[in-house]
């Protein structure tokens, strides 16, 4: 079975007013819940006009009040930029506010301007901080109290329950803790290998199948080191999927201005800076890798029947995955085409994907 998710990265047009953009994201999560989409992810960045959300847990908290079933995921909280004791408690509260629908995505942060803002320009240091912070958060969620823990970067002295104060009494709603997710990009991602060691949810981004197969191999290798059996149903695949009433309408949406601008002006330029542009389509000259090329050759695009066939073929090619997570885009100026796409995705494509084995 393949489930569907959406990801409010968000791919925001920089000229969009902040409040309008946040309300658009929340509205799309509400719509996704109504039409049977299973998950909604929301990213965290501080200095990117194209990805303009700095507190995903606030977006998810707002969405939790008007949704019932959809799982709500931070994708991801960037641990070097938080006090992990405070974040552990905010996420426990969010787990209760969502009725146990929270997925906690954790990451180290990859954008240089975010790192500059927090005075942490060295990626190796951020990864070390992330490991320390994640272990501390898991301890707060699961260990008996009182306890003390001191790592290289953080320490916690958790007090015992005091009857006068009536606390501390915080525990997650989901026991032993909310599902944890870790994302990876590089061909043999060390992050995904680490996720495998702990049995966390792996997430891969929209790259060529050979990269994605390498991601699963890294995850499975990490699981083997811990004696765990890797479960492909946990694997989240972030990949663009566009649908419509006809193949032509689906392609028109994929070629529309908000999508093309986000990729040509931002996403592809980011991958170019990271030396990963060729990972979208190995063997294709990099100057030919444009949003239009991806829409016509790489993304999953088509009317419901076409799209289901393409997702099934993609699923078989990489060996299987559990949730296809497709991004949302900034269609605030013309919302109906994108909302129609989501409705068709949830109501017509989703039930067919549930039959994939």
Image: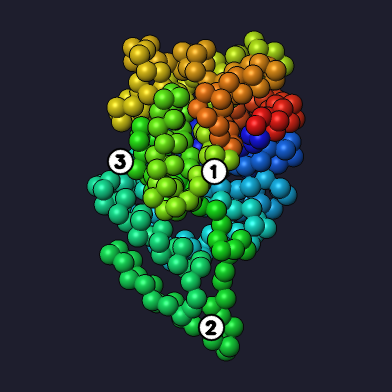
User: How far apart are labels 3 and 1 at the CA level?
Assistant: 33 Å
Is residue 219 in sight in this rendering? yes
In the rendered image of this protein, does residue 283 appear above or below residue 161?
A: above
Q: Which mark is residue 231?
A: 1
Residue that label 2 marks? 161
Residue 212 quadrant: top left
Q: State which tag comes first along the sequence, 3 or 2.
A: 3
Looking at the image, which residue is at 41% across and 25% down?
Answer: 210
User: How far apart are labels 2 and 1 at the CA level?
Assistant: 38 Å
> Which quarter of the rendering shows the C terminus?
top right
Residue 102 is situated, as x and y percent measured from the top left of the image, at 59, 53
Left or right, 3 with reference to 321: right
Does the residue at mark 2 contact the one at mark 1 (Cβ under 8 Å)? no
Residue 353 quadrant: top right
Residue 235 is situated, as x and y percent measured from the top left of the image, at 53, 39
In the rendered image of this protein, does residue 259 appear above or below residue 45?
A: above
Q: Which mark is residue 52?
A: none
Q: Nearer the viewer, residue 230 or 175?
A: 230
In the rendered image of this protein, does residue 130 appear above or below residue 48?
A: below
Q: Nearer the viewer, residue 57 or 221?
A: 221
Q: State which tag comes first along the sequence, 3 or 1.
A: 3
Residue that label 3 marks? 112
Tag nearer the camera, 3 or 2? 2
Secondary structure at badge 2 equals loop
Total numbered badges shown on the rendered structure: 3
> Which quarter of the rendering shows the N terminus?
top right
Q: Nearer the viewer, residue 37 or 305?
A: 305
Secondary structure at badge 3 equals helix
Residue 191 is situated, as x and y percent measured from the top left of the image, at 38, 44
Does the residue at mark 3 contact the one at mark 1 (Cβ under 8 Å)? no
The colour scheme used to paint the residues is rainbow
């Amino acid at each position: 079975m393949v489930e569907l998710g959406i990801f409010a990265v968000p791919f925001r047009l920089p000229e969009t007013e902040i409040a309008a953009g946040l309300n658009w994201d929340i509205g799309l999560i509400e719509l996704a819940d109504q039409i049977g989409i299973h998950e909604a992810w929301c990213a965290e960045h501080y200095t990117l006009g194209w990805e303009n959300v700095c507190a995903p847990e606030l977006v998810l908290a707002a969405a939790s009040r008007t949704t019932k079933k959809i799982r709500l995921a931070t994708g991801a909280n960037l641990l070097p930029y938080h006090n992990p004791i405070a974040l552990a408690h905010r996420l426990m509260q969010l787990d209760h506010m969502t009725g146990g629908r929270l997925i906690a995505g954790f990451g180290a942060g990859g954008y240089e301007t975010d790192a500059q803002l927090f005075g942490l320009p060295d990626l190796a240091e951020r990864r070390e901080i992330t490991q320390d912070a994640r272990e501390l958060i898991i301890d707060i969620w699961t260990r008996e109290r009182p306890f003390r823990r001191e790592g290289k970067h953080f320490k916690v002295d958790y007090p015992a329950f005091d009857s006068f104060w009536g606390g501390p009494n915080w525990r997650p709603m989901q026991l032993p803790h909310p599902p944890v997710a870790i994302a990876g990009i590089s061909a043999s991602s060390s992050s995904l290998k680490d996720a495998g060691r702990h049995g966390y949810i792996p997430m891969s981004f929209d790259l060529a199948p050979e990269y994605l197969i390498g991601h699963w191999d890294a995850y499975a290798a990490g699981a083997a080191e811990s004696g765990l059996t890797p479960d492909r149903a946990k694997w989240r695949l972030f990949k663009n999927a566009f649908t419509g009433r006809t193949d032509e309408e689906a392609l028109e949406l994929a070629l529309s201005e908000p999508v093309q601008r986000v990729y040509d002006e931002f996403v592809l330029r980011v991958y170019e800076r990271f030396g990963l542009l060729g990972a979208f389509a190995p063997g294709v000259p990099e100057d030919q890798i444009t949003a239009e090329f991806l829409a016509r050759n790489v993304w999953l695009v088509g009317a419901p029947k076409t799209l289901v066939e393409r997702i099934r073929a993609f699923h078989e090619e990489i060996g299987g995955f559990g949730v296809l997570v497709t991004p949302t885009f900034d269609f605030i100026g013309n919302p109906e085409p994108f909302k129609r796409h989501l409705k068709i995705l949830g109501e017509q494509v989703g039930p067919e994907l549930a039959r994939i084995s």
